[in-house]
Amino acid sequence: MSAIETLVEVALAKATKDSAVHGVDKDQYLLCSSVVKADVRNYHTVKVLQKGLDESQAKAAALALLSQQYPQLAAGGGTASDGPADAAEKVVKTLERLSSSQLGHLAAGWATQLGEAFTNASILSTVEAGSLAGRTGSGKVPLESGEEAQMPYTVIQGPSEGMYVLEESGAQGEPRRSVILNTTLVTLMLQPTQAHVVSNATLVKINGSSSALAVFRKLPKSGSAAEDHVSLEEILQLADGLPAAGAVSLSGEERVKTFARALEAKVSGGEGSSWLAAVGDKATYSVFELRSQLERLGPDFTPVAALPAPKSCAEFFTRNIRGENWGDFAKRVAPLIEPDEQRCNFIRSSEAVLRDAIERWLESGLGSLREASVASLALRTDWSVDAACSLMYQFAMAKDQQRLAPPTPPPGVPPPILTQPIIKITTGGSGEGGDEALSAAAAAQSLTTAERECVKRLAALAAIEDNKGVDEIAKYIDGASSAGAPSPHIMRLVHATDASVNSLASSYVADDGFVVDLRSIRRAMLHRLESMHFGFATDKQWSEEQRRQAGRIRVGRFSEVDIACLLEGQEDGFSKKAPLAHIKCPVKLQMALGVFFSIWAKAHLTFSSHILAFGANVARFLHQTREDGASWEQLSDYWRKLMQKCEQPALRFERKEALAPLQPPLLKWADDRSVTHVAELMDAVNRSERERLAKLLEEARAPKESAELAELRKMVKQQGSKQKQHEERLELNARLGRKDGKDPCWFHHIKGSCRYDAAECRGHHG
């Protein structure tokens, strides 16, 4: 039986009952012509054949219809007495997007094998010259020697029509080859994928993209790799020609990680989650099949040919930007090219002038762009204003970075000496933060001319609305932009405390707007953090005190943060020596910890998942120790020492003892007894518990008086109380005397309160 006849056997069925909804009568022939998976369900297209057809006529019509739809299946054999035109006349109507349950109402048990049958049909229908080239798989491959070998293979172009060459994938030496017929290849492809070993040299570890990793590991090689790893060659083959894979100039490992991050972002919510659920229904995919699935995610995951090289640099940036988009583009790009306001307005006034200004500004040409690994954006056919502006921001940072090195003087000429210091630096800074202020002043004093220009560029980005410019600043500060590693002097100023910047402003001699630019950069970074914290809602904002606390978190000065203030907006009683003692509410503590670690994670996005995991461990440990009897003073001592430990990287960077200001805390700092502050808290809790138990034991061992003696003590006490009250009444009568026939009220004059008023009381209140 041919492939097309096999498909007809499954796809043709009789209606088992009448269906008024679909207009189908019992015993009327139905033909499923296609199966499409959308979200997590299969949807079927059903052709309703004429009434009164016998079995042979229905099969002939079905064979003709499916042969027309799957011509490659029909090429293997199977003929129909009726041609396509005759078969089309036998179709009464077509029912589209029927679910499996609806098929079950039409013909009981019909939908059971339809999905698998049409999946195999789609594979079989692609068997034509070259259509399977590039496909990968694993199985028992017949070699030229006549033997069979279990191996991973890649399909390459065959020597003639109907023939394919299989080449062993990932071979250490000369790869084995096999020339087989297309029918043999189809049989091999339809076999279950066999596991095989992938060389460690070709593996890439994927971190932070769990959903993308799960999708990649459905491929043969990647699924057999070590945990959290994928096959480099396989993923590069999957990502070939896709804009989401990043620049071709990147290394293979970086392209795989870029592709994983892009896929993770796409499927992390919304429509992407339904795509992920649909892909998860199948255990394994070939590269060919998975690429077909990726195309459903949009243009970033659809293969496109590289556009022709632009004739000029300006054309590279401004392609597809026209009409109403040009004004937005000019507004955002002109300040980068010309910081002066009047000149900026002039070049914005004309499209031709701005294009010419862009061309002159990009004096180093497209070569620098490729070196900066941003040429991948040329693949995009939906070139947008955001994409163009983002690329120009990166290029601006790259240009500034290239100019950071001071010019080398000619031989024999000493380097120039500044005749007037920019900053008056005094030694022996007194008061809190004196060393930090000196460090910030020294960093500002060390800035080169190019670095000062870079600060101006960053300040221009900070002035752009909607956080778009601030995102580029964040990339520069994090070292993720095409400009490379940021200047350490600029980094020290951006991560300095507010007190240090205020001290710098008071000692700054030159009047060139440097401190204003620096403050605008820092303010923009803090505003970005605030927007992220409130989910970019425009109707919510921090109080001034909360903003001050969040600023300390951003620069890594955690020991000075009042976490209760982050929750309430204002809190009294905070002390650096006992930072948790004023909270005194376990529920409030847990909520404040959640807000604190959330802001910390958003401030340092590079380590966000690690920081959140660390915060969960800290919150759990504090809750447990509080339940075990720890006092608020003991919890405060633990928190103070923990925060001092966490802020050490920022302090070391400030003292030039480290190259980076941000380092994630170790997870063991939260609750590992081998860490000093954890051991001290646990010992203090155990000591307090031992003292409490010892006191209870001492009370239990103390001799107890008899019940008769206790009753006697009670009677003596009551008698003494009555005697004292009698004496007080006598003294009161002698002092105030009787009035209106009443003695003085003892409750009113001695106790200060009487339940009756003066008229009703048996004693007088006068």
Image: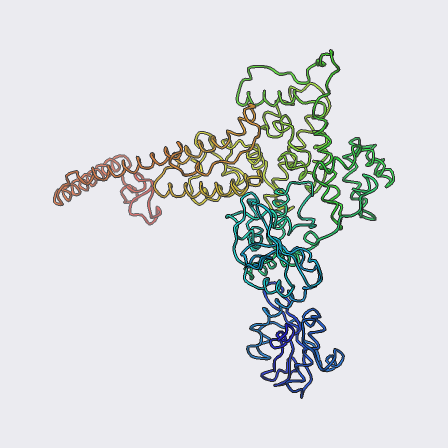
Report x, y in % for residue 242.
Answer: 69, 50
Report x, y in % for residue 4.
Answer: 65, 73
Asked whether residue 642 appears in the rendered view, the answer is yes
- Pick the front one: 248 or 687: 248
Q: Is residue 488 left or right of residue 228?
A: right
Residue 43 lies in quadrant? bottom right
Residue lying at 38% horizontally and 41% vertically, measured from the top left: 626
Q: How is the image coloured?
A: rainbow
Residue 254 lies in quadrant? top right
Asked whether residue 567 appears in the rendered view, the answer is no
Report x, y in % for residue 590.
Answer: 46, 44
Residue lying at 55% horizontally and 21% vertically, measured from the top left: 435
560 up-or-down from 225: above or below: above
- Pick the front one: 136 or 179: 179
Q: Quadrant of the N terminus?
A: bottom right
278 up-or-down from 12: above or below: above
- Pick the front one: 152 or 370: 152
Report x, y in % for residue 703.
Answer: 14, 39
619 up-or-down from 559: above or below: below
Residue lying at 74% horizontally and 37% vertically, measured from the top left: 369
Q: Is residue 394 left or right of residue 37?
A: right
As drawn, which residue projects farthest toward the front?
Answer: 145
- How many numbered discs? 0
Q: Quadrant of the C terminus?
A: top left
